[in-house]
Image: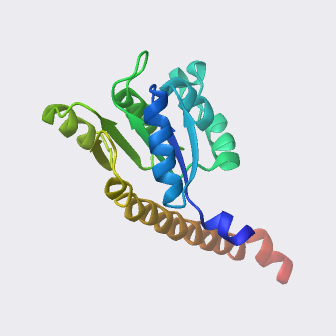
Amino acid sequence: MAIAAESQFHVLAVDDSRIDRMLIERLLKTSSFHVTTVDSATKALKILGLVEDDLRNFDTNVASKFHQDVEVNMIITDYCMPGMTGYDLLRKIKESKSLKDIPVVIMSSENVPSRINRCLEEGAEEFFLKPVQQSDVNKLKPHLLKSRVKEEQDQPINNKRKGMEESYSPNKNRQKM
């Protein structure tokens, strides 16, 4: 059971509409995703470990500590929300050193090509028109798998570098002699 939970992807769904949140949550759970829903971009940033005060400084220590505990693998957000739009949320995530690699998907009930292009140019993986369909959700797995492969590739490199640094350490070589 623990193995299945570890391999399950965790998606943070952000939408100010309760009905849309319930729909996206049901679609994601049908596809075996673990889902957390919130009704604002500000709440999403808090879950990700970025709070308003930290946004000005991009306090990555706070974000990385919280992100390690929660581990959100993808964010799917509505474009049009009061306070902070999904586009603003996307930009804050992509500007954060610790969160920039999390895939972000934008959804909207308005088909505005310039808005769609702007979101994709700023780093959104997909842009879905509402109501979101199961066929849309099926497009998410490749983005999640790509990000997981990237994480796995980065981790052995860092461990290999650390091992090499330790084996070539001047103090370690002196102790052997």
Query: Up-down: is 119 above or below 27?
Result: above
Seen from the viewer's position, the closer of residues 24 and 7 is 24
Farthest-out residue, bottom: 177
Q: Residue at x 54, y 69 (%)?
A: 152
Residue 5 horizontal/vertical position (percent): 67, 63
Q: Residue at x 62, y 50 (%)?
A: 71
Residue 86 horizontal/vertical position (percent): 38, 30
Residue 66 placement: quadrant: top right
Protein image colouring? rainbow
Q: Quadrant of the C terminus?
A: bottom right
Residue 115 horizontal/vertical position (percent): 20, 32
The answer to whether residue 169 of the structure is visible from this angle is no
User: In the image, is 52 to the left or to the right of 75?
Assistant: right
Q: Residue at x 59, y 24 (%)?
A: 54
Q: Quadrant of the N terminus?
A: bottom right
The number of numbered discs placed on residues in the rendered structure image is 0
User: In the image, is 170 to the left or to the right of 111?
Assistant: right
Residue 35 horizontal/vertical position (percent): 57, 47
Seen from the viewer's position, the closer of residues 100 and 119 is 119
Farthest-out residue, left: 113
Query: Up-down: is 160 above or below 118?
Result: below
Query: Up-down: is 150 above or below 123?
Result: below
User: In the image, is 121 to the left or to the right of 103?
Assistant: left
The answer to whether residue 163 of the structure is visible from this angle is yes
